[in-house]
Amino acid sequence: MSGHHWISAPHHHERETLLAGLALPPLLASVDAHRRLRGPYTAAGTLLRLLAPEALERRPALAARHYIELQESTPELAALVPPITHHIEEQSTAGEVSRYPARLHSLRVAHGIVDFLLGALADAQRGPRTLVVENIQHADVTDQEFLAAALRRIPPELLTLVLCSGTERLLDPPGFPSLSLPEALAAYTTTTRGAGSVPPARAPGPQAAREYVDGDCVAEEPALTEAYERLGAAERAALHDRRAAELAERAEREPSLRLGALPYHLMRGSDAAGAGVEALRAALLRCKYLGFYHIAAELGDEGRRFVDPAERPELWWVFIRESGVCLAAAGRPDESAVLQEEARMATLNPAHHMKLAYEIGMLYARHYPEERRDPRRARAWVNTAIALADLLPDPKERSFYSVFNRNGLALVEVRDGRPDEALRLLDEGIERLGRELGLGEKTWHRVGLRYNRAQVNSMSGRLEAALEDYAEIMDADDDFADHYFNRGNILRKLGRIEEAIADYERALSLEAPFPEAYYNRGDARLELGDTEGALADFDRTLELEPGHQEALLGRAGLFADAGEAEAALADVDTGLSLAPGHAHLLCLRGRLLAEAGRTKEAAEALAAALAGDPGLAEAWAVRGELAYLEGDLPAAAADFDRAVELADRPDFRFNRAVVHEAAGRFAEAATDYDAVYEATGDPDAVRQRDSCRRAAERSTV
């Protein structure tokens, strides 16, 4: 049977038996997705370590195209691809992190890995192959995203995926999942379920416990787990120490082990309170830095449960605070709020309470779902953080945190519809940091204030001021994709389309593939009349995000203009299945149905479009065309009048002129034709104008 496969059975031995019964292409690799082994991208990284060196040698261009996703998912490949640059961190004081990635960054990395595999496998001349992935029920969110993207995007005839799990129900991660592995399994795989056969019994031998630990404790075989449980605490710790020593030596060459098996064994060895928690802390901070927030929160949770806040308050603080921050960033604000409250109950440190107040304020300002955000509560908490910051004894710390917290207050003011007050706070902060901190101190925060000011200026229509902000920002921070993406949006609003496209292209070179930049570049290309380039970008957007409504609309419009009505209507219907009230999609549906002669359905679609957006000029114009075709000239004229009132476009005026001409209103028709000619130089318009003028003269004789 062709296609991808999902094998679900309670025991590994049965999954192997079921796998052997499938008719599959030759095996490319069999990998384990259990996050205990290497943390984020355990499965993807194992596959890339096997394939990437040869593929990069055979196709060197893949290195430049996929350098971000390869080294972030698989640090062992860093020497084979161009380095990721963060110039601002190089300019800053030691240890200062410039920024943390957006929540969707890991999904972009997942798509980049899929892109790499498609490129690496397509010309490998190996024929179809099979990839087996075990233990997907224990996969990190990053591997779940990768596997979900791979199931949809990789053709089975190129690489057949066989995903294996136990029988427990697979669930999406908590929070706001970016891509659902359970949904992808349901949509793209054939499921083979086991009967639950019992594995052959094996008496636990003297080496069984060691075998279990050497396998990083992921084996399901009862003989191994029972042997391990029978050991005394000291014997178990000794086995973990031995395994940790082996992994520590390997981690010099395989740093991904530091995010999975190495801290796991150190936390269960004889020095958990020393080497263990330090390995856990390092793994947590590294995962947070890369934007792998779910597993970072998991690592932090283990640390905070192990470390007593009374005995080691600063280490406990790292674990509980970073866990709360990562939970919020992962789209899990309620869990973050629980940790914030736990921390407030456990500490009397004023600086801790200042930071907690700020983070709680940000929950209400940005992390809760829209319907639960509350600017009043956000302002109250951030004001508490500001008040505590102003009491800090160290002058530079006081200056920095006072400005930092007021920066958060600026966000609250923007969300509360007060951009001028936000700008005042940001301007004061920029001036104060420049006056009170030395060169190189808190460099990122200085840039961050300007970035926020650019955002506020852009949102409030101060586009030239926003561009000036970005000029300053990029002097210090020229390798961050969001800067180019945002500046490209501003340049488009100013009509500087070629410059905007250049910025979108730069953004795409600095980030793993993300659909928004492809869509915006396509839309900008469309403004320049580059329909081929626009179609390619809309295709790419929808390859990455099939439900991107604006890309569906843009591509459907191009199909409609090219006479490919069936393809256009398919995209429109896909978009409306996701957003039934999308006015522009309904309008295009009405146009397509009208052109197909399905006038009743067209009228219904246009009525729905105008019910959703009465100011949609295009819908009035299409309805006017429909009325004209049905011979209702008064209704057609009224609809075109409304369309021209809303958007005085030459095509609307031309069609209204046709209606006026058909109704014998030659003077009005001549006026519209003349306006079209003045705007476009269309020779048809001038011919029709002159004809109508002559007709008007004859009618007055």
Image (cartoon, rainbow, N blue to C red):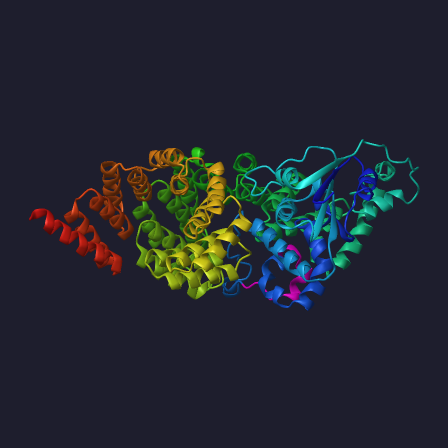
Outermost residue toward the left in this view: 701
Image side of residue 670 versus residue 49, left or right:
left
Q: Can residue 445 be seen at all in this image of the molecule?
A: no
Q: Where is residue 226 in the image (x, y as percent from the top left)?
A: 86, 36
Closer to us: 479 or 231: 479
Please report the bounds of the magenta region as a residue range: 72-85
Image side of residue 575 versus residue 595, left or right:
right
Q: Is residue 487 highlighted in magenta? A: no
Q: Where is residue 413 in the image (x, y as percent from the top left)?
A: 35, 43
Closer to us: 54 or 679: 679
Reply above or below: 491 against 343.
below
Residue at the spot x=62%, y=46% of the render?
Answer: 152
Closer to us: 26 or 653: 653
User: Which quarter of the figure has residue 645?
Assistant: top left
Q: Is residue 83 highlighted in magenta? A: yes
Image side of residue 39 versus residue 462, left or right:
right
Reply above or below: 476 against 410.
below
Q: Where is residue 56 in the image (x, y as percent from the top left)?
A: 67, 65
Reply above or below: 538 against 592.
below
Residue at the spot x=64%, y=44% of the render?
Answer: 144
Q: Can residue 11 be seen at all in this image of the molecule?
A: yes
Closer to us: 445 or 413: 413
Q: In which quarter of the image is the N terminus?
A: top right
